[in-house]
Image: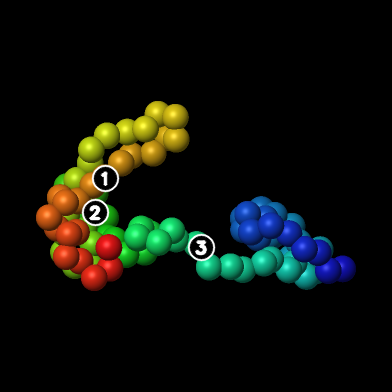
Amino acid sequence: MDLSADGEFHTGGNLKHFEDQEWRLRVPVSEPHVAKGKLDHRYFSYFADQDIFVCHEGAELKRIGYDKHKQRTRYRAPVEACANCPQA
């Protein structure tokens, strides 16, 4: 049997279930879209002991707050660090 599924169904218990049934699972793969002028998480390294992100250019992004609605911690680099960055 061939099945199609969204990306979140190809991991963990769901995947094991399909493999146990010897079913072939087709999962669409796509690259994440990043808006122009923004960088995604792949461009940064996180250092938990300091609670900072560092970009590939060496700029430190410090914690500036937590958005309860989106359940997300926000980090920001100094404006001058990004002003002349070829990636930003």
71 or 36: which is nearer to us?
A: 36
Label 1 vs label 3: CA separation?
20 Å
Colour theme: rainbow
Q: Position of residue 41 (x, y in %)?
A: 36, 58
Name the mark nearer the viewer: 2 or 3: 3
Query: Which x, y percent locates residue 79?
Result: 16, 51
| Nearer to the camera, 7 or 36 | 36
Q: Which mark is residue 58?
A: none
Give the number of the disc on residue 75. Answer: 1
In the image: residue 4, left or right of residue 1:
left
Q: Earlier in the sequence, mark 2 or mark 3?
A: 3
Q: Position of residue 1 (x, y in %)?
A: 87, 68
Residue lying at 23% horizontally and 47% vertically, measured from the top left: 76
- Give the mark, 2 or 1, whose residue is nearer the N terminus: 2
Residue that sits furthest to the top in the current view: 68
Residue 36 in view here: yes
Quadrant showing the C terminus:
bottom left
| Percent position of residue 39, x then y | 35, 60
**Mark 2 sits on what residue?**
53
Specify the amino acid type for callout 2: Phe
Q: Secondary structure at mark 3?
A: loop
Q: What residue is rendered at 77% in x and 63% in y?
A: 4
Pointer 2 and pointer 1: residues touching (CB < 8 Å)?
yes
Cα distance between the residues tagged 2 and 1? 8 Å
Whichever of labels 1 and 3 marks the residue nearer the N terminus, that label is 3
- What distance separates the C-alpha of mark 2 from that of mark 3? 20 Å
Q: Which residue is identified by label 3?
A: 32
Residue 65 location, quadrant: top left
